[in-house]
Image (cartoon, rainbow, N blue to C red):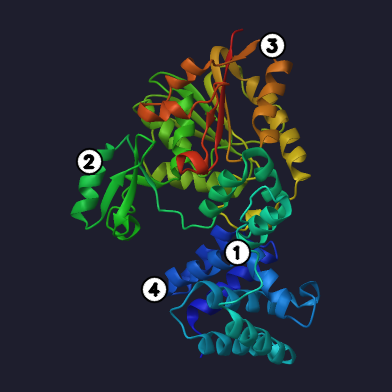
Amino acid sequence: MIAPARRAALDVLGAVDAGRLDLGAALARARVGLADDRDRALTSELAIGTLRWQGQIDHVLAAFSSRPLGRLDRQVLNIVRLAAYQLLHLDRVPAAAVVDDAVQQTRRAGKASAAGFVNAVLRSISRRRHALPLPSRPEDPRDREAALAYLSVGLSHPRWLAERWLDRWGFDRAETWLRFNNAGAPLTIRANTIEIARGDLAVRLADEGVETRPTDWAPDGLVPTSGNPLRTRLADAGLFLVQDEASQLVPLLAAARPGMRILDACAAPGGKTLAMAGSARGQAAIVAADVRPGRVALLRRIIAQHRVPHVSLVQMDVEQPLPLAASFDAVLLDAPCSGLGTLRRDPEIRWRRQPEQLAVFAAAQQRMLKHAAAVVKPGGRLVYATCSSEPEENEEVAAAFLRQHPRFRGLEPPEAQVLLPGRASSLVDERGHLRTWPFEHGLEAFFGAVFVFEG
């Protein structure tokens, strides 16, 4: 009998591979059909791990396959990828059971003619798994080809991306970054400071058997060290929200205060709206917008669950001129982007993105900035943020905006540092931008720039 988690993980891989769902949505759907928490956890581990190590896995499969991988049926390919991940990176299930499950999955999928192929490839990998044809870490990192082979194949990233980071940051930092992306990401939550302070939330969670530590950089975040806050009675009480630590820093740049009028232009799922409302002690008028009805519906649920006051929800497209007056003290544009700064949490992105897409994202981001800028009142601020690591979407977009909008100015580093409390002020670079780096800060790669409209 095929283990439930392996069946569910294969369904997740199929949905992501076909582009029907992103990884988060595919996992959420798969978990609904699993009653056991252990099966839910294993499904996530199998699906995320297979996507994370897909480049390395495909290299190994190609070495043992009698057929080009590009000619394999997609479902068969996902079956052997999933099993290969278990053989290469997990050791809790005997190899023979992994191979047998994969053969059964192949037959269950109606691909019985491929069962012999699946069996042969996986048994070959199992026999050779301690001496696989994988590039090793180069003794001399200055050997560019050896370095790229190790970074792209050995550490399972697209070659074009490994090459970019190697050239920009050097071998040691690039290696640290890729290893960071291949490690498990911790669950991070942010206190709903409208309702409760971070310290008080930690006490309430401890009463529920969940021990936490404060986040290293973000002032309102907690990282569970034992127990799961999502399995407690507090999970649906609106006292906290799951939010990446680097993402928690972005809304601080808006410097929300009581009495302000604020636009969160790409607001879903709502974490930044919630954070700005908390900074304003629930006394700011916030317009939270997103382009798709489903995203607006998600916003509505989050805002209601966390009891955020004075929030108006609007469906609108920031790529078009906005139906709003120039009346906002602060506008936050957390723009759609390549997501290349979040590969630890979203491993499938590394295989979806291509270098030519960066220019497409940047052009859309510039249009959005133009429209967002038009609703900032004199003396107000416009915050531009992405979860991309790439300068085309960040520094270059910010510089182009300032060239095209001379009535705005960027913040100098000391001005930006004041917006970030404690040691987080050190995350401001020499241009006055918020910049977080995996190899330096242990955070996903986020970017934030603040522009003041001088009128």
Q: Residue at x 40, y 53 (%)?
A: 187
Q: Quadrant of residue 132?
A: bottom right
Q: Which residue is disc 2 drawn over?
A: 200
Residue 166 is tagged as: none
Left or right: 9 as drawn, with respect to 350:
left
Q: Quadrant of residue 73?
A: bottom right
Q: Which residue is disc 4 drawn over?
A: 38
Left or right: 180 as drawn, with respect to 51:
left
Element class at badge 1: helix
Q: Are marks 4 and 1 in contact (CB under 8 Å)?
A: no
Disc 3 crowd rating (10 Å Cα; few below 14, some 14-19, many 20+) is: few
Asked whether the viewer can see residue 323, the reply is no
Element class at badge 3: loop
Task: Residue type at mark 1: give it.
Answer: Leu
For marks 3 and 2, the one nearer the N-term is 2
In the displayed structure, 389 sits above or below 428; it is: below
For marks 4 and 3, the one nearer the N-term is 4
Residue 51 is tagged as: 1
Q: Residue at x 60, y 59 (%)?
A: 137
Task: Residue type at mark 4: give it.
Answer: Arg
- C-alpha distance separating marks 1 and 3: 44 Å
For marks 1 and 2, the one nearer the N-term is 1
- C-alpha distance separating marks 4 and 1: 20 Å
For marks 4 and 2, the one nearer the N-term is 4
Left or right: 324 as drawn, with respect to 438:
right
